[in-house]
Image: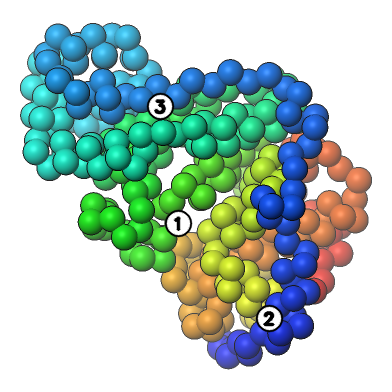
Amino acid sequence: MKKITLPALTFFSVLAIISCNRTKDTCELPEAYLKIPVDLEIVRMEDLYFEELTREKLLYNQEKYPEFSAAMFDNMGFQNQDQMVDELLKIHGDSGMQDLYQEVKVHFDNIENIEESLENAFRGIKHHYPDFKIPQVYTFVTGFGSDLIINEDIIVIGLDYFLPEDHPFQPVDLPYYILKRYNEQHLVPTIVTALSSQFNHIDVKDRTLLAEMIFYGKAYHFTKTILPCTPDEYIIGYETKEILGSYANEEMIWGHFIENELLYETNPFEIRRYTGEAPFTDVISPDAPGRIGRWLGWNIVDDYLINNDLSLQELMEQDDAREIFSKSGYKPR
């Protein structure tokens, strides 16, 4: 495969793309979203497990919050309740864990911004899906064991993962290109993208690269619709320069996919090259950001909606990736 050296953006191309981007400073949430009542209470479980924890208090927590306990501790391999209690008392009494908890308390003493952002996100989802049941949301200090646990009933936010980038406490097993997305700006968009999976219909028999690209494109469009004032960078997890560079070189990137007949590729290894986590898409160019196939899928989905009069529900229910592509009329900008 021929690799591409992506040229630098011109001043005018940067201005053109920036002028099309909406930010929180120039955007207001739809009034229809704001009219939907949402009463969200985030339970700060770290306080219950790190402040003067005793056996009795731990057992009480387990009984009062069984969904949290099951989500957080059932996969830790405890053989019985006594072992679980003993180990959890040891873990949460550890000096290093206590130090981590104290740092989380300093940086996340007030989580009103997170709570407000989640409330607005849930309003948006309920506007499009009135039967959507708002999950119970918990925060916790996991010792870098779990960043986010998300399903239809529960969300657990591991706040230790979202400490500032220059903080001395950081997960040691994450490369920087992933670690830089662990911040408050990416938190709610990541949660909404994960929640989109329950609405994102797929054809399980279609295992092509195109199908995976469209799946992610629908997920990102869902998140942008629910969080219209959130910059694209925080939805897809690119830096601004990566967004700008990708748009400036979209024709060459798309040309690589067409010339190498990639859209209907079914080899999982090849698919991962274009949609999997990576610092860059090396088979295209060292300047092309990782997961570039997801970004292209988002553009295809956006064009599909521009050229077809569909609601968000209709888009998410469409499981035919080839039809989405064929009716998108997609062409690089």
Question: Up-down: is 96 above or below 283?
Answer: above
State which quadrant residue 247 falls in: bottom right
Residue 190 rendering spot, x and y as whole percentages: 52, 46
Label 1 neighbour load within 10 Å: few <14, some 14-19, many 20+ = many
Does 293 sit left or right of 178 as displayed? Answer: right
In the image, what residue occupies the spot 74% across and 30% down?
33
- For residue 76, the mark is none
- Of label 1 and label 2, which has the lower sequence position? 1
Q: For the residues carrying marks 1 and 2, which lies nearer the camera in this image?
A: 1
Q: Amino acid at mark 1?
A: Arg
Judge the density around disc 3: few (<14), some (14-19), many (≥20) Cα neighbours within 10 Å: some
Where is residue 126 drawn, in percent x and y?
70, 26
**Can I make out residue 14 in this image?**
yes
Pointer 2 residue? 249
Query: Left or right of 213: which side holds 61?
Result: left
Q: List x then y, in percent, for residue 254.
A: 70, 76
Q: Nearer the viewer, residue 278 or 13?
A: 13
